[in-house]
Image (cartoon, coloured by chain):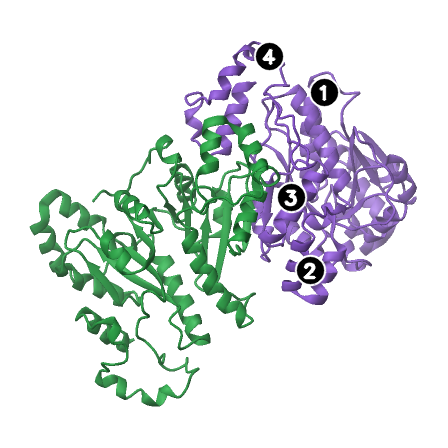
Chain colours: A green, B purple
Amino acid sequence: MVKMSLHLVQVMQKVSPSANGDSRASWEEDEEEDEEEDEDHLGLPTTTKPPKPENAVTVAVSSRVLFRTELEQKVFEQKGVEEYLRYQIEHENEPFAPGPAFPFVKALETVNARLRELYPQSEELFDIVLVTYNHAHVGIRLINTINHHNLFIERFCMTGGSSPIGYLKAWHTNLYLSADADKVREALAEGIAAATMFMTEKLTEVSESQLRVAFDGDAVLFSDESERIFKAHGLDKFFQHERDNEDTLLDHGPLKGFLEALGKLQKKFYAKGQRLDCPIRTYLVTARSAASSGIRALKTLRAWGLEIDEALFLAGAPKGPMLEKIRPHIYFDDQMFHVEGAAEMGTVAAHVPYGVAQKHNQPQNPGVRK
Amino acid sequence: MVKMSLHLVQVMQKVSPSANGDSRASWEEDEEEDEEEDEDHLGLPTTTKPVTGRRARKVEGGVFFPKPENAVTVAVSSRVLFRTELEQKVFEQKGVEEYLRYQIEHENEPFAPGPAFPFVKALETVNARLRELYPQSEELFDIVLVTYNHAHVGIRLINTINHHNLFIERFCMTGGSSPIGYLKAWHTNLYLSADADKVREALAEGIAAATMFMTEKLTEVSESQLRVAFDGDAVLFSDESERIFKAHGLDKFFQHERDNEDTLLDHGPLKGFLEALGKLQKKFYAKGQRLDCPIRTYLVTARSAASSGIRALKTLRAWGLEIDEALFLAGAPKGPMLEKIRPHIYFDDQMFHVEGAAEMGTVAAHVPYGVAQKHNQPQNPGVRK
């Protein structure tokens, strides 16, 4: 663990990620005897350096969803920047409490540990980037918090008030989680999978050994074309349209790429015979009806080469109880109605502000504004 | 009527239910003249041309997607709704990958009906009658298809459902995980599976469940009336009397029943389902359709009437459950009786009776509950997954 902190310090001092292996610190020399052992996963990992962003599945998380920062937000809003910075420095050694994205990030690290066991040289891992509007002053408190919670977050993006969206592309971000719906919309417009997260008081316990990600279908994995037809012309036309176009693939939605990235990592486990014990599990939880409109969704997934582990066609039944059984670390939906329903039952739900549903359903709880 | 469909539509696409009536779709404008007719259950214009050889699904008036807590939810495994023995063999002999490949290859070949098929068809018949009488009500049967299969296989199942003209819109494809956790979320009133272990798990969770087996011989059953037959002890009632009988013999059993005549029997795993059926039956009685009710229930018990029947009947009455026909057999074989009744499904806790019924072509489901399980291991545990 101490090694972890030292490496953090290195990144904080902005060693270039492309200098992998070239600039070895003195502590690395001691580890040379580990180099010969490919499978040394009992001792320290043989490679602790972060993967190249384009090889990894990069998840950019805002500090406000990774940790609970409501108190500090209030100080900022009520008393202004200077007071806020003073407050943060004063409380530097008090770690933040975990936020809604915390269990998700922990689970990503669990998967990484399993991946490293099987493929010690591979860079196809999850990589977490902490994105925050904060100034560098606050960095210390964040680092202290990360270490306190035993997280492995090496990459920071502290924008000191500027928009982080431009950086997301530079980080080859595969998923961006934020408390700010506007930033999320910007990211979606840039073609980056993104979702808004909210703090809930009630949080059901989630698995510590298996990452579970649940997706809505329309306007999340798929485009919102079917929802448009439904809203414009009603149920009959919707069914008709789906039947007529059964063999036409649906267009892709904003989270399709992330499901793809998860699938790629899953296949690495299958290749090593660990299908039954795979630490990543994906779920489709859709309001579609199976017989009337399910075929098109399933054919589309198959044509994309995406295997989803479990599929629930609810035909309008409430999603809350199903999600409460699944216990995903995160659930993506385009409608606030469902996000709130899930949250009521303790599921961490993230809103994807995409598609025609946004015009009809204004979020009831837009999250903390910043 | 049209407004109800809008509500459906709203539920379907997750618009907040509190926005009733505010966002009317353009198609609603055309139907305004129908608003005045209370009994219009022909409702919305339906699609008339079939597509790609499959029937057009007609969304007629009435609730089609009831909320699970309002409906009588029957969760059926794909392996009892359809005949999938061939595919099971491929899975067991050649493994997952080959199995998936096989299913995709045969995607457009519908499965043949399985043991639960006539039962599910009968549920839909009852639903049609209920919608005629109570178009706004969500108190209907709702069928959820539960399967271990991965999403790939979903297409073949959907094709099969459409081929057989079933109306099953809710799927739970668990990709290998146990479906038991989901059963509660679906407010399942009855779970039918080929897997006795899963059925036992469901019973332990308090969900009525039974194991079904494929029989070669199947007698014809009514297409207009759902008939459900129940054993008494350890199915509708608890197994307390059976315990006494097995421990102390017939005399003590009779003694015990007489002594406790006015003490209600404790409830058994299928009591709740009988209750749900009774609730739906009362809806038909309320509309003067007692003689023509499309649901009929039967008690087929090995109990003897005079010696031990009173306690059973008093218990049913105290529970407010009316059973239509009661056969006290005092040990006579159940097979011939069931063959006359022709139930769509018969629930019994003893494999001996389940097999006896199956031999005569009755669809019998085993309820693995109570003391009889220790004495009678299932002869035919069903196909193992």
- Residue B14 in sight here: no
Q: In the image shown, does B257 or A38 lie closer to the viewer?
A: A38
- Residue B285 badge: 1
Chain to which the residue tagged by mark 1 belongs: B
Q: Are marks 3 and 1 in contact (CB under 8 Å)?
A: no
Task: Please tell me whether mark 2 sits on a helix, a strand or a loop.
Answer: loop
Q: Earlier in the sequence, mark 2 or mark 1?
A: 1
Q: Residue at x 71, y 64 (%)?
A: B92
Dot 4: chain letter? B
Q: In screen coordinates, is B105 left or right of B353?
A: left
Is residue B209 toward the left or the right of residue B329 in the image? Answer: left
Q: Compute the Cα span from label 3 to label 4.
A: 34 Å
Please name whichever residue, B329 or A87, is drawn nearer the observer in this view of the structure: A87
Residue B239, compared with residue B129, is above or below; it is below
Give whichever of discs 2 and 4 has the lower sequence position.
4
Which residue is disc 3 drawn over?
B158
Q: Which mark is residue B385?
A: 2
- Quick one: SS at disc 3? helix
Q: Write down the residue under mark 4.
A: B38
Q: Amino acid at mark 4?
A: Asp
Give the residue displayed 17% in from the left and 64% down from the top: A140
Please rate how many residues cluster around mark 3, counting C-alpha atoms within 10 Å: few if below 14, some from 14 to 19, many from 20.
Answer: many
Q: Could you tell me how far apart the alpha carbons at marks 3 and 2 are, in whole angstroms? A: 21 Å
What's the CA distance linking mark 2 and mark 1?
A: 43 Å
In the rendered image, the residue lying farthest to the bottom is: A33
User: Mark 2–mark 4 contact, CB under 8 Å?
Assistant: no
Which-is-in-front pick, marks 3 and 2? 3
Q: In terms of sequence position, does the residue under pointer 3 or pointer 2 come before the other? A: 3
